[in-house]
Image: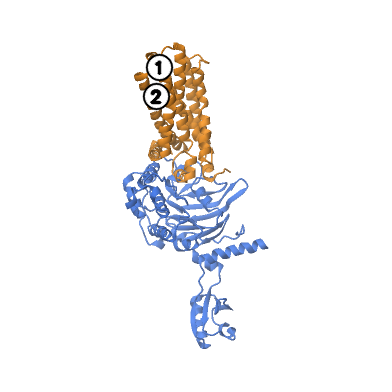
């Protein structure tokens, strides 16, 4: 799809790097730290219980980014799953990881989750360098919600969560389970067998399970895959509430509107990392800024109207009717264009800044890749 | 991170709760199959002629008890064969392996969850068999069962055979991609140790306490080797990604 070795547009997660470790997802342990500036100052907790791991010999750094990935790659024999991937994710950030099927998103998550060993590069996950020896310590500090909920269907919701609370050796298991279920609005279904739940509710149970250990980084691997719009909306609301609580989330998805709505920054991967940054940054970098103009009657000579207007760099007739005007800065150019239109006696129906969605960015990259392959 | 019995217990409790609600395990593997395996020896015991020579009686009882040993050989193999590949098929393996659990903890939890019900079932069936013998069998047969070395041999070999079957079952399960294939293979693979018991029963090897203990020691060593082999074969990456670098 995308060409390999293309430029990576990167933006560092400076807004999120506050050296906090994580925020309690279950409403406990709010004691110290500073949260993301974008979310307002929120207290960050010390981490307790999650892998309450006195035996662990691995010291986790609480400074810097939640994830630091440098030239990471994974091969399965001759097949490259992903390669030369580098990025950072700050604490409290929701980071979207986009890409088409087979792009290497899930393998990246599994690699960072220590389920799969990298073939090249290095990473630090929740302050712990990624290696075979540190696997259990990293796994104690993170959670991964796989695409499939993977629940024990004959066990009740509570029994499923109890099993995982014991696997993390958490304290106050009943309290944590209750808070986790409250967080996903499932308290009333606590004693139902998971096999009796709808797909959307199972996804919520999986999310509650992922929240049990107050992870320093929560990996959500296509959490809305296969869900109907209502269940998708519910999961989005849950992610928004986690984001508001300052939870660090690594979200893989190929739903672009999902990433645009939920993520502070996104990266687009197709074996190699093609693009990284805030959605609005990406739009600005890939597309010229512009104004959309609609008037009741087309101009006989639009050049007479637009040429020479301050801030206008060019114009073309829009396929949808009207005019697309390229500008250096919409804030400066828009009033000048409006004045020019009025001076030309036009009946203005619509004048607004051009908006490009993340989907436009994504499709633009795909088109680029197709063009590159043709050449 | 050190070995944790809490995590072993989590797997054990989860497995036992799951078995309790799984009709295949509860009804077929733990009830119907053992009852089938005990039916033949019991009928044979009750039909045995009272006037037979003691050596013939001894051989006959040995054969019947050999059938009884099929319980610890076959029952755990069918259940343990499901343990890894079944979780893979259900999609539950990845969430478990994402936790800090060590492979040794996972495997011991799985093995305990199979051996505990297996021993309960096998010893219960053996108890039923002995009770029927005590109440309904001819006195000659009764004394041959209770006076000989059959009972200690049975008690000793039951957990050793179960251990072998479990490790073989889990090993096959960790390498299979289909539950049914894993179960069929592990049933076959669990049978060879029974050959030792068969050799004793049919007097190809002259039975003695020392020999029984020696063979038990060999089975114990095989069980330990099986555990080491299974632990070495258990590869998170291959289990999750289906392939290895």
The quadrant of the picture occupied by the N terminus of chain A is bottom right
Q: Which chain is orange?
A: B
Q: Which residue is mark 2?
A: B126
Task: From the top left corner, tell me how far across and down residue B126 is, in percent.
Answer: 39, 24
Q: Secondary structure at mark 2?
A: helix
Residue A190 picture location, percent across and down: 34, 49
**Is B86 situated left or right of A34 in this image?**
right
Tell me which numbered mark, 2 or 1, is placed earlier along the sequence: 2
Position of the C terminus of chain A by quadrant:
bottom right
Chain letter of disc 2 in the image: B
Closer-to-camera residue (B198/B207): B198
B49 relative position to A108: left or right: left
Q: Identify the residue position indicated by label 1 in the image.
A: B145
Task: Pick the residue in front: A275 or B188.
Answer: B188
Q: Chain of mark 1?
A: B
What kind of element bears circle 1?
helix
């Amino acid at each position: 799809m995308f060409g390999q070795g293309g430029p990576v547009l990167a933006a560092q997660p400076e807004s999120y790097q506050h050296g906090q470790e994580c925020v309690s997802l279950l409403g406990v342990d709010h004691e110290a730290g500073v949260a993301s500036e974008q979310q307002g100052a929120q207290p960050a907790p010390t981490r307790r219980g999650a892998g309450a791991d006195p035996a662990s010999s691995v010291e986790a750094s609480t400074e810097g980014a939640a994830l630091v990935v440098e030239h990471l790659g994974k091969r399965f024999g001759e097949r490259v799953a992903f390669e030369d991937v580098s990025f950072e994710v700050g604490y409290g950030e929701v980071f979207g990881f986009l890409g088409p099927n087979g792009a290497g998103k899930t393998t990246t998550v599994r690699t960072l989750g220590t389920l799969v060993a990298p073939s090249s590069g290095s990473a630090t996950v929740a302050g712990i360098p990624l290696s075979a020896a540190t696997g259990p310590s990293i796994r104690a500090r993170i959670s991964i919600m796989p695409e499939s909920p993977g629940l024990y269907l004959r066990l009740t919701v509570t029994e499923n969560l109890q099993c995982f609370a014991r696997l993390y050796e958490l304290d106050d298991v009943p309290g944590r389970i209750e808070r986790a279920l409250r967080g996903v609005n499932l308290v009333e279904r606590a004693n139902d067998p998971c096999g009796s739940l709808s797909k959307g509710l199972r996804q919520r149970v999986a999310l509650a399970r992922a929240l049990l250990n107050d992870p320093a980084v929560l990996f959500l691997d296509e959490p809305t895959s296969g869900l109907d719009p209502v269940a998708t909306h519910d999961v989005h609301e849950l992610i928004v509430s986690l984001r508001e609580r300052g939870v660090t989330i690594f979200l893989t998805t190929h739903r672009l509107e999902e990433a645009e709505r939920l993520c502070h920054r996104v990266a687009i991967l197709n074996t190699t990392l093609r693009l990284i940054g805030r959605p609005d940054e990406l739009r600005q970098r890939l597309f010229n800024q512009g104004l959309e103009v609609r008037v009741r009657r087309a101009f006989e000579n639009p050049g007479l109207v637009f040429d020479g207007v301050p801030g206008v760099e060019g114009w073309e007739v829009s396929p949808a009717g009207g005019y697309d005007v390229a500008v250096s800065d919409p804030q400066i150019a828009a009033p000048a264009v409006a004045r020019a239109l009025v001076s030309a006696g036009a009946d203005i129906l619509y004048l607004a800044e051009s908006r490009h969605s993340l989907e436009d960015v994504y499709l633009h990259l795909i088109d680029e890749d197709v063009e590159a392959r043709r050449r | 991170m050190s070995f944790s019995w809490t995590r072993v217990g989590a797997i054990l409790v989860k497995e036992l709760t799951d078995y309790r609600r799984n009709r295949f395990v509860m009804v077929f593997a733990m009830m119907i199959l053992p009852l089938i395996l005990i039916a033949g020896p019991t009928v044979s015991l009750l039909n045995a002629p009272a006037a037979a020579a003691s050596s013939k009686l001894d051989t006959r009882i040995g054969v019947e008890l050999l059938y009884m040993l099929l319980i610890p050989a076959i029952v755990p193999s069918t259940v343990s064969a499901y343990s890894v590949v079944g979780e893979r098929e259900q999609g539950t393996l990845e969430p478990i392996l994402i936790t800090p659990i060590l492979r040794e903890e996972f495997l011991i939890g799985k093995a305990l969850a199979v051996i505990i019900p297996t021993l309960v079932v096998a010893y219960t069936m053996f108890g039923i068999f002995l009770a029927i013998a005590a109440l309904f069998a001819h006195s000659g047969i009764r004394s041959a069962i209770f006076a000989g070395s059959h009972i200690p041999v049975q008690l000793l070999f039951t957990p050793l055979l179960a251990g072998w079957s479990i490790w073989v079952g889990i090993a096959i399960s960790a390498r299979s991609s289909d539950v049914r294939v894993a179960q069929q293979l592990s049933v076959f693979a669990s049978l060879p140790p029974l050959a030792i018991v068969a050799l004793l029963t049919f007097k190809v090897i002259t039975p003695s306490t020392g020999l029984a203990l020696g063979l038990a020691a060999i089975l114990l060593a095989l069980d330990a080797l099986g555990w080491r082999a299974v632990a070495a074969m258990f590869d998170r990456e291959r289990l999750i990604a289906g392939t290895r670098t």
